C-alpha cells in the first residue's frame, strides 16, 4: 500500500528473487499473511455459539463479529496515506504485537458492545500489518519475482479462511469460547516473531516526492471512472462474501442440516479449491483482460447461490465452494487492476480501495443480517445476488479506454 509509481531498487532480503531459498521465502510470505488475518473470519465458525452466549439475534452477533472490517477500512485508508513515512518492518511488528491485546480481551468481553469495540481494534491492527506487508513486498521484490511473492501472500490469506475456521471450531468445541481467543492471540504473537526473524532491516525506500497531497490524490482517483468502478466492485465483493459466509452458519446448525460445532468447522474445507484457483487470477487477467475475468468470476459465484438454498448438505457445500472461488478470484483480479489503473499516488489508490472493500463487508453484515432476521435465508441469498449483479454492472466500466477491454 505504497506509491509504487517511482522506480525502486530491490534490496537483498530474504524475500529477494535471487536468494537461494525461494521456496522458504514463499513459505514465510504465506505464513505471514496467514498469521496476519487469521482472526478476521475465524470467529464466523463459532457465530451460533457466540449468539447463544450473548443472548442476541444472529444479525446483532453477525454485525459485532464483522465490525473488524470497520477497523480495517479505517486503517487501510490511513496506512495508504501515511505509508511513505512508516518503517515497514517496525510497523508490521508493532501491528501484530498490538493485535494480540484485543484478541486476548475478547475472551472476557462482558457484553456485545465491548466485543464489537474489540473487533474494531483487531481490524485496525490487522489492516495495518496487511497493508505494510504488501508495501514491503512491492518494494523489496524484483519485478520478475513480484508475481510469485504476491501469489504466496494471497494463498496464505485464503488459507487463513479455511484453517482459522477449523481451529476456531475445534478449540471452542473442546475447550470453550475463551480458549479460542487465547489461541489466536498466541498466533498473533507468533506472526510478530516470524516477522522479527525473517524480515531483515533494509534501507528506507525513497520514492520521488508526490506531486499532490493525499486529499488531492484521492479526489483525482475518485474522478477516474475505472477506479470508481473498482472501488464499488470491492464493496460489492465483500458485501456478498460476508453475507454468504456469516449467515450460512445459522442455516447449517438448524434443521434439516443440524450440524454440530466441530462439523461446522469441517464445512470450511470448501475453501480448499479457492486456495488453488486464486493464484491463477493474474494469468487469467493477462490472457482474458480484467473485464472478462471478473465477469466470469462473479458468474461462478452467482451460480452457487441457488445451490445454497438446497435442503441437503451436499447442495449447500457446492454452493459455498462456488461463491468462495468466484469472490476470491474476483477480489484478486480487482486488486491488481487498481494498481494498474492508478497513474500515480498508488498508495492512496490502494488504501481507498481497501477502505471501500471493507466497508462493503460491514454494510453487508448489517443489511443482510436484517434480511436474515426478518425474512429468512432466501431473502439473504437474494441480497447477495443483488450485490453480485451490481458488481457485474460495475465491471463494464473497469476497462473504459483500456486496450484490453
Image (cartoon, rainbow, N blue to C red):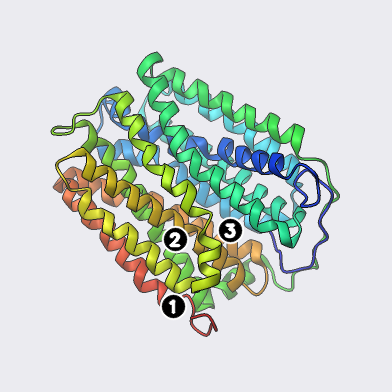
Q: Which secondary structure lies at badge 3?
A: helix
Decide if residue 165 is on the left or right side of residue 248: right
**Of 279 and 94, which appears nearest the observer?**
279
Residue 365 in sight in this render: no
Instruction: Name the residue that disc number 3 marks.
Output: 351
Q: Name the mark on residue 12.
A: none
Decide if residue 383 is on the left or right side of residue 134: left
Mark 2 or 3, nearer chain start: 2
Residue at figure coordinates x 14%, y 32% from the top left = 255
Instruction: Name the residue that disc number 2 marks.
Output: 330
User: Are discs 3 and 1 less than 8 Å apart at CB?
Assistant: no
Q: Which secondary structure lies at badge 1?
A: loop
Counting from the top left corner in percent of width and height, residue 232 is at: 43, 66
Residue at figure coordinates x 84%, y 49% from the top left = 12
2 or 3: mark nearer the eye:
2
Counting from the top left corner in percent of width and height, residue 393 is at: 35, 73
Q: Quadrant of residue 82?
A: bottom right
1 or 2: mark nearer the eye:
2
User: Are discs 1 and 2 less than 8 Å apart at CB?
Assistant: no
Residue 311 in sight in this render: yes
Q: Name the mark on residue 397.
A: 1
Q: Quadrant of residue 147?
A: bottom right
**Label 3 vs label 1: CA separation?**
20 Å
Q: Which secondary structure lies at badge 2?
A: helix
Mark 1 or 2, nearer chain start: 2
**Label 1 vs label 2: CA separation?**
15 Å
Counting from the top left corner in percent of width and height, residue 327 is at: 40, 55
Q: Quadrant of the N terminus?
A: bottom right
Decide if residue 134 is on the left or right side of residue 56: right
Amino acid at each position: 500500500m505504497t506509491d509504487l509509481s517511482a522506480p525502486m531498487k530491490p534490496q537483498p532480503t530474504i524475500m529477494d528473487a535471487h536468494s537461494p531459498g525461494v521456496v522458504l521465502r514463499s513459505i514465510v510470505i504465506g505464513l505471514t499473511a496467514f498469521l496476519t488475518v487469521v482472526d478476521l473470519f475465524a470467529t464466523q465458525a463459532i457465530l451460533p455459539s457466540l449468539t447463544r452466549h450473548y443472548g442476541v439475534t444472529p444479525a446483532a452477533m453477525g454485525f459485532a463479529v464483522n465490525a473488524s472490517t470497520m477497523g480495517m477500512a479505517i486503517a487501510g485508508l490511513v496506512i495508504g496515506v501515511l505509508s511513505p513515512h512508516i518503517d515497514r518492518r517496525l510497523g508490521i511488528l508493532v501491528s501484530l504485537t498490538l493485535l494480540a491485546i484485543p484478541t486476548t480481551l475478547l475472551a472476557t468481553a462482558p457484553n456485545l458492545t465491548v466485543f464489537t469495540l474489540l473487533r474494531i481494534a483487531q481490524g485496525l491492527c490487522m489492516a495495518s500489518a496487511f497493508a505494510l506487508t504488501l508495501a514491503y513486498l512491492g518494494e523489496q521484490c524484483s519485478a520478475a519475482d513480484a508475481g510469485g511473492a504476491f501469489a504466496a501472500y494471497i494463498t496464505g490469506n485464503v488459507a487463513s479462511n479455511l484453517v482459522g475456521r477449523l481451529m476456531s471450531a475445534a478449540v471452542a468445541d473442546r475447550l470453550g469460547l475463551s480458549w479460542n481467543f487465547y489461541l489466536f492471540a498466541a498466533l498473533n504473537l507468533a506472526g510478530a516473531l516470524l516477522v522479527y526473524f525473517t524480515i531483515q532491516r533494509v534501507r528506507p525506500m525513497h520514492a520521488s516526492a508526490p506531486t499532490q497531497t493525499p486529499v488531492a490524490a484521492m479526489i483525482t482517483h475518485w474522478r477516474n471512472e475505472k477506479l470508481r468502478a473498482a472501488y464499488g466492485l470491492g464493496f460489492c465483493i465483500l458485501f456478498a462474501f460476508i453475507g454468504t459466509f456469516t449467515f450460512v452458519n445459522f442455516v447449517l446448525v438448524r434443521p434439516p442440516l443440524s450440524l454440530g460445532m466441530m462439523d461446522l468447522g469441517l464445512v470450511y474445507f470448501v475453501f480448499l479449491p479457492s486456495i488453488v484457483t486464486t493464484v491463477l487470477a493474474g494469468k487469467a487477467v493477462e490472457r482474458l483482460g480484467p473485464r472478462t475475468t471478473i465477469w466470469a468470476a462473479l458468474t461462478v459465484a452467482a451460480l452457487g447461490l441457488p445451490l445454497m438454498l438446497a435442503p441437503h448438505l451436499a447442495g449447500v457445500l457446492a454452493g459455498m465452494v462456488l461463491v468462495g472461488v468466484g469472490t476470491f478470484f474476483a477480489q484478486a483480479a480487482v486488486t491488481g487492476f487498481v494498481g494498474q489503473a492508478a497513474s500515480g499516488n498508488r498508495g492512496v489508490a490502494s488504501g481507498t480501495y481497501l477502505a471501500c472493500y471493507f466497508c462493503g463487508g460491514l454494510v453487508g453484515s448489517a443489511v443482510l443480517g436484517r434480511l436474515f432476521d426478518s425474512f429468512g435465508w432466501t431473502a439473504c441469498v437474494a441480497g447477495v445476488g443483488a450485490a453480485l449483479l451490481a458488481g457485474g454492472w460495475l465491471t463494464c466500466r473497469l476497462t473504459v479506454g483500456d486496450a484490453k477491454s
